[in-house]
Image: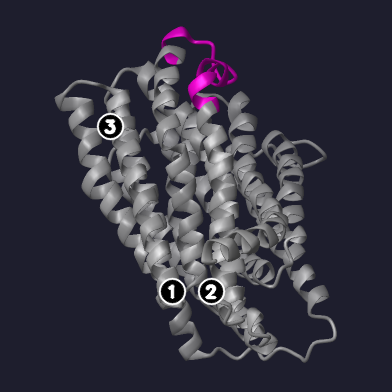
Amino acid sequence: IRMAHLLDDLRREFRPMLALAAPLALAELGWMAMGVVDTVMAGPLGPVAIGAGSLGSMLFYPIVICGTGMLLGMDALVSQSFGAGARPDCRRTLVNGLWLGAGLAPALALALWALIPLLRLTGTNPRVLVLFAAYLKALLWGILPLMFYTAFRRYLQAVDVVKPIAFALVSANVVNIAGNYALMYGHWGFPAMGLTGSGYSTSIARVYMAAVLLAAVAWHERGSPSFSFRPDIPRLRRLAALGLPAALQILAEGAVFGVVTVFAAKLDEASLAAHGIAVNVIATTYMVPLGIGSAAAVRVGQAVGRKDPRGVAAAGWSALMIGALFMGTAGVALWTVPQWIVEVITHDAPVVAVGVGLLRIAAFFELFDGLQAVATGALRGLGDTRSPMLAHLAGYWMVGLPVAYLLCFYFRWGAPGIWVGLSAALILIGSALLVVWKRQLDRVR
């Protein structure tokens, strides 16, 4: 009887989950596209600019995305309040999310600013450093609007308003392309600022994203009682308590990919290039379950707020099914047509040869990568951000990284050894978080 109920609940939940997840997955892909566009448009500026831009992105994004991770606790608090019908409580969490974002922005900017003298001390190429410093300073202007955008996004998706989020990200790419065209190359009467212009264009796009979602919030809340913008210290502490483990999980994951890229940089040029291509491919596929995970956090949190255990189970399992379906299909594609995928990016024979092998290894962990992303979101809807953090720390740092190092250098497998290590980590993390989800469901019931 219990299984029959679950199947009925899954059938009812599947369509609303997909309706929520699709725009959020599109938004994540839009975020990914912005970085790709910047890289492509910087190409004509030459290798020094490309190197400085890549260095800036590699250092800027892990730190800032870790900061936005501090706001992920809004998923649980807002969605649970919304499910309980406590709309004023939803608004209080939004206000305090904005306060938290505003407080974090200067700290993030200072941390990034400090990288400039640090890189000078480590002997970074002086020509690269000059361009990097100017580019980074231009990017700093976008941190505060990015934090506000994140707070608005977490709020809107938790109250089932997702179309403006997808629109903001997709249209921000148009703003960014136009800004790059004008500011990098001096069109429409603007000075040609090179890579620095790309940094300002990105910051302008983030102001635009925040403004679009501010307008969406204002429209959605029209007719509601006026907001109180006073900070609520206990709620700020609750947001920080939920957000800190999520931020540390993001940091742990991002740092691992940074470390294995350093490993790959010790190998031949073809292996490093193939590693970079493979990372970009799996990062692109990962955006979809990341969006589904956000939808899972919302639907699970709303069911918790309604005190609906069956709804909690149906929301989590339906999201996991959708994520598994997509990533299983992606895994089949990586296994069956890896050469075609690599050759979309390069036709260099040695790079293609290595890249094909790396994507075939990645095919083994695609399903588990999707499961861990969606399970992380579902657990966040329950208010559990600690379990995913521990799973990622243990899986990546205690298993994946040591295995990658040993296979790559001690057993001389090269780049495939690195990817076998990543595969082992993700299979363990995905499996562990499924077990945690099942146990948490038993407690909810």
Q: Seen from this angle, which residue lies furthest front?
A: 1
Type of amino acid at the residue the image marks with label 3: Phe
Q: Secondary structure at mark 3?
A: helix
**Which disc is residue 242 wearing?**
1
Towards the viewer: 15 or 79 = 15
Q: Seen from this angle, which residue lies furthest left?
A: 410
- Magenta region: 333-351
- Residue at 46%, 38% (x, y): give it: 366
Towards the viewer: 342 or 127 = 342
Within 10 Å of disc 3 (Cα), the crowding (few <14, some 14-19, many 20+) is some
Asked which quadrant contains residue 94, the reply is: bottom right
Towards the viewer: 207 or 406 = 406
Q: Position of residue 281 (x, y in %)?
A: 52, 32
Q: Are marks 2 and 1 in contact (CB under 8 Å)?
A: yes
- Residue at 52%, 69% (x, y): give it: 381
Foreground: disc 1 or disc 3? 1
Type of amino acid at the residue the image marks with label 2: Ala
Work out whether residue 139 can be spotted. no
The residue that label 2 is drawn on is 76
Towards the viewer: 9 or 184 = 9
Q: Is residue 403 left or right of residue 312?
A: left
Q: Position of residue 378 (x, y in %)?
A: 51, 63
The residue that label 3 is drawn on is 263
Query: Where is 342 relative to 232, above or below?
Result: above
Foreground: disc 2 or disc 3? 2
Mark 2 to mark 1 CA distance (whole Å): 9 Å
